[in-house]
Amino acid sequence: MTATTTAPLATSPTRTARQPSDRLRAWATRAPLLPALIFMIVVTQLPFVATLVISFFDWNALYPKARHFTGFDNYQQVLSDADLRHSVWTTVLLTVAVVLASLVLGLLLALLLDRKFRGRGFVRTLLIAPFLVVPVAAALLWKHVLYNPEYGLLNGLLHYVGGPQPDWISNNPLLAVEASLVWQWTPFMMLILLAGLQSRDQQQIEAAKVDGANDWQVFRYLTLPHLRRYLELGGLLGSIYIVQNFDAVFTITSGGLGTANLPYTVYQSFYQAHENGLASAAGVLVVIGSIIIATFALRVVSSLFREEASHA
Amino acid sequence: MSSIAVRVRDRRKGAGLGLVAWVLGIVFFLPIAWMALTSFHSETDAATNPPSFGAALTLDGYRDFFGTGGGASPWPALINSLVASVASTVFVLLLAFPAAYALSIRPVKKWTDVLFFFLSTKMLPVVAGLLPIYLFAKNAGMLDNIWLLVILYTSMNLPIAVWMMQSFLAEVPVAVIEAAQIDGARLPTILARVVAPIALPGIAATSLICFIFSWNELLFARVLTGVVAETAPVFLTGFITSQGLFLAKVCAASLVVSLPVLAAGFAAQDKLVQGLSLGAVK
């Protein structure tokens, strides 16, 4: 990609690097980049630094005068508070369940869509649609239109077969949230995996089939190894987005019934309880969790990135 | 086995699996189809068990949603969302386009590091900066101001846009740019007259992705806006608690608010993957 094709255009470093005109040229090269870079640092990095600082203060917004430095007290409180610890666990459970389920379903759908059949483009469009419903609207749709125990579609359909009429959200609140998210995120996984499937070496597959390999062997020994990167990418990007999920939890259960995840808890502790210090400490913990996921994510993205660069 | 025999066998199996794909596609789409149908039913027909599939169609749900029967009109929220999404997308493009140039066509030293810095900011959870932003907005008197959301949405989408644009601009032939340079064109002219026209499909795809993400955003909007700058997703949160028979209205509301995203997404199905995977998947 770029690394190879544009190398000659890059300013030649060494030799006369100390001469002012070269330094000027280097800045001229950087200039187009600076507005975006500075904007990002100011809007995303500075608030995080502020969060970090606030997390070391005992600070309730309703009693601003009582604000004082408390060291790691907030962290201790966050980690020892049963509710907050539960929300950490909920976040992990929600993220892992949704990512795994939508990856498996997404893979299945991608494999089906990779074959030629009548109306393939149309089916693809049908499958993408759930991802294009505004998240709050999707959550409302599941909460009121599908899950409602009295007139929801799920119980309506169960009625036809004489099945039970469960109260979906009260019986399995976390599962209810997860199902709605799996519905929205499966298309995302499907799209990424489909891109992976379509970048396979078709000649190699054809050759393996002629040599007598069956479908399962082709899948197991050719397709799956090729898809590994795409599965990783889908899983990690999905994790990053779903760890941060707020809309579904906020809409379907309003954080009740043990479904409050960390983003919801952070939101609640400063928006409703006005505990700025505690909220910040919880926020910093979310960041630490995300950094762990992100480190892996960045590695996967950069290896895909280099692979594509070496193809070009 | 001969290659032809393999193809014949595959074709027969393909028909069966195609049917499975059709069934799954319909299952996934069913909630949306049902939402659309319910939005055209009367409230009493919408709330029956078993569901009344063939009930008479009416526009009452939509009339109700648009506030003709009393209640708050969604128009201010829809317009706010439009302003926030369009303005932030314009700002993103203005910032990302030159940056992508400096990362692809005329790359700065260590350009991959810079690219990955942009990506890493995307992985910083929104909640991490929410409180300081809220406090800042409160002190600066910018709470409930749509332009605060514009700034935040710009920062939210800039990394995605830089990544996408970088990969699009990398495909612009260097010779064209060199020729313009020899003719004495300066950078802004080159960007506007030479690079932009070639990268236009890419710019369009980037815009669509940024528009969708801004339109969907809830957490910032919920915390930082109130009556004046409320966006469409915040308006929708008014439907979280049941209000008697209101299913048709909820469906109409959800559908109307989702319509721009559905339209934009269908228009750019392929670019969707690229944007969501931050340019890692083409």
Image: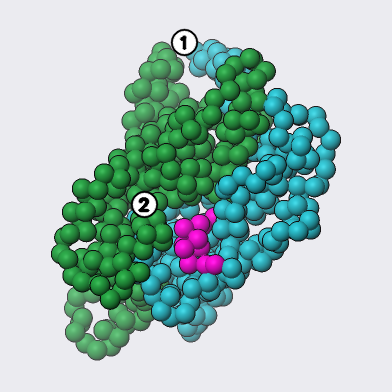
Residue at 27 percent of width and 84 percent of height: A22
User: In terms of depth relative to the viewer, which is nearer, A5 or B144?
Assistant: B144
Q: Which residues are magenta?
A: B215-226
The label on residue A265 is 2
Residue B186 can be seen, yes or no? yes
Q: Position of residue A39 (x, y in %)?
A: 39, 74
The reply, left or right, for residue B199 in relation to residue A3 is right
Q: Position of residue A144 (x, y in %)?
A: 60, 39
Residue A310 can be seen, yes or no? no
Residue occupied by mark 1: B1
Toward the bottom, the furthest residue is A20
Q: Chain of mark 1?
A: B
The reply, left or right, for residue B25 in relation to residue A83 is right
The label on residue A188 is none
Type of amino acid at the residue the image marks with label 1 = Met
Residue at 28 percent of width and 55 percent of height: A282
- Labels 2 and 1 within one chain: no
Chain A, hue in figure: green
Occupied quadrant, residue B107: bottom left
Chain appearing in cyan on the rendered image:
B
**What number of labels is visible?**
2
User: In terms of depth relative to the viewer, which is nearer, A189 or B164?
Assistant: A189
Q: In the picture shown, does residue B45 fall above or below B71? A: above
Q: In the picture shown, does residue A68 fall above or below A181? A: below
- Mark 2–mark 1 Cα distance, whole angstroms, equals 61 Å
